[in-house]
Image (tube, grey):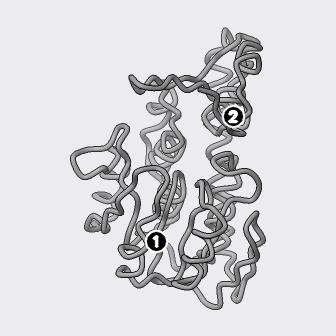
Amino acid sequence: MPSTRIPRLLAAAGFALTFALTACSSGGDDPAEASGPGGGAFPVTIEHALGDTTIESEPERVVTWGFGSTDAALALGVVPVAMPAQSYGGDEQGVLPWIGDELTELDAETPTILQNDGTDVPVEQIAAARPDVILANYSGLTQDQYDTLSRIAPTVAYPGEPWATPWRDVVATVGQALGRSDDAERLIADTEAIIADKAAEYPQLQGRTVAAVWDTGDTFYVYKPADSRVEFLTDLGLVSAPSVTELSTDESSSTSR
């Protein structure tokens, strides 16, 4: 995997730390130029919190929903036909800067941008994209929404709680769904190596407490340890502040507000 793609994958989950985003600049083997997907065997069945999803053959038209799945697919050399708009950090279309850069590197057009208000799912837009698979590995799909999407195409939801899928699980499951498990394993290993290098470069982070927050103006969010953003920070040696747990409202497995 090209090392320039790994920081973008981390950033997709909100890992907005300068030293992570600038971790690598050297290139490597481009999965888009590889001889083919690695570790793929179909049909494949993926178990998740909302059901079991069977994908009969290698998907050609991929739709992503939620966070992370878009980045993982692109890092594995697969360009979605439709992806969600991201209001926080996205451009006027809702495209995040590292997603735009990756599309440019892959010489790909911008996919259809799905309306994204955080709760409702644009079912008609997704159906119009004629997907072979819908990847919502890190999302907040309800059972009803999942059932509706599953009538359009095989849909993969989160493995445990909504909005709380570890980034490694997002990458591994996207790789499995796309028939690129071997590539996904390499991507995870390369990403872990970058994190370990940065943790070693900044030993002063070890044991320091941290709180990941987002102030929207109307609501102040504090992210719990189950959130991938916090997971990345703890991978660097930081510790989730005890006050985060104290502030918990139990409204969500990954955030307090």
Q: Residue at x 67, y 13 (%)?
A: 205
Question: Of callouts 1 and 2, which one flags the residue occurring earlier in the amino acid sequence?
Answer: 1
Q: Is residue 197 visible?
A: no
Label 2, secondary structure: give it.
helix
Q: Residue at x 66, y 39 (%)?
A: 193
Q: Is residue 39 above or below residue 48?
A: below
Numbered label attached to residue 231: 2
Horizontal and vertical percent for residue 219? 47, 26
Amino acid on which the number 1 mark rests in the picture: Val
Q: Quadrant of residue 116?
A: bottom left
Q: Is residue 225 above or below residue 109?
A: above
The residue carrying mark 1 is 63
Q: Residues within 10 Å of mark 2 (few under 14, many from 20)?
A: many
- Front position in the image: 189 or 101: 101
Amino acid on which the number 2 mark rests in the picture: Glu
Q: Is residue 43 above or below residue 196?
A: below
Whole-angstrom CA distance, mark 1 to mark 2, is 26 Å
Mark 1–mark 2 CB contact (< 8 Å): no
- Front position in the image: 55 or 58: 55
